[in-house]
Amino acid sequence: MCGRYRRTTAEEELARRYQIPIPPQRDLPISWNIAPSQDVLTVRYNPKTKQRSLDALRWGLIPYWAKDEKIAYKTINARVETVDTAPSYREAFKKRRCLIPADTFYEWKKVVGGKIPYAIGMKDDSPFVFAGPWEGWKDPATDEWLRTCTIITGEPNDLVAQIHTRMPVILPDEQHDAWLCDEAGKEILIPFPSDRMKAWPISPRVNKPENNDPEIIAPVGAGEAMTVPIDLPRLT
């Protein structure tokens, strides 16, 4: 699964990088430790204006047919194997897609005696995007609309496989248009090349979302950032 990540690239830079013609109306603060149920920055495409936009959506998809918000606790991730058939996601997968910018994501490696958190990102430290569907849900109690999203996860690449059994689907730049415009199916939702990524152990401070500062991604124990193959430390 993907349950935590970092987005510290400014919105202005993301707008330039991902071809957003109109700057966002309000800034969404950067975060070193983004958690489910929080508002997250997304890239969406408007087929009427034929333009992309940067929008804040809540992480945890609420299907349009849901009676309340509680389902969002179970829908922070959509499995690539069933994103097109599961009732919670299938309509959004067909018609409403987004890209979710990130700078690193976090996974926990099970070892003897506990878990070791790892930060995972690009070798060149550049931002990247997760693939996801989004949905609009009208609160029956207030008649207000809430827009939410989820992150698609799939099989890990060779690097992440040594840490966790799944990883978020990261889309390369050349696939962004096809995804946002609903022109591509699941064939592009494949593991991102491991030779372009790195991973390193970090402090268990990341376990608590309230710990939100640059020290979150400071390497612990191993020193240099690791690439495939990696020698995972063991707890005793």
Image (spheres, rainbow, N blue to C red):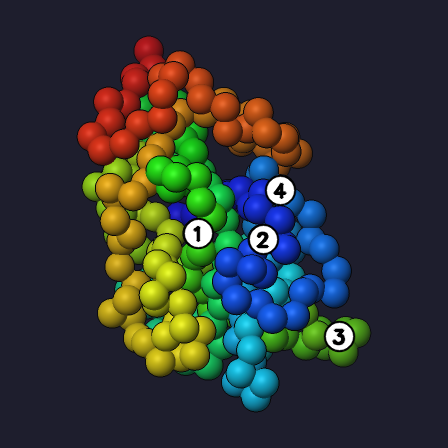
Q: Amino acid at mark 4?
A: Ser
Q: Which residue is mark 4?
A: 31
Quarter the C terminus occupies = top left
Q: Is residue 16 left or right of residue 170?
A: right
Which of disc 2 and disc 4 is earlier in sequence? 2
Under circle 1, the secondary element is strand
Which of disc 3 and disc 2 is earlier in sequence? 2
Vertically, is 19 above or below 103?
A: below
Vertically, is 185 above or below 3?
A: below
Q: Which residue is mark 2?
A: 13
Which of disc 4 and disc 1 is earlier in sequence? 4
Q: Residue at x 40, y 67 (%)?
A: 176
Q: Which residue is mark 3?
A: 144
| Circle number at residue 128 | 1
Under circle 4, the secondary element is strand
Q: Amino acid at mark 3?
A: Glu
The answer to whether the residue labelled 4 contacts the one labelled 3, judged by CB atoms less than 8 Å apart, is no
Vertically, is 79 above or below 29?
A: below
Whole-Å distance between the Cαs marked 4 and 2? 15 Å
Foreground disc of the pair 2, 3: 2
Q: Residue 84, percent across and down? A: 35, 74
- Nearest the viewer among 57 and 86 is 57
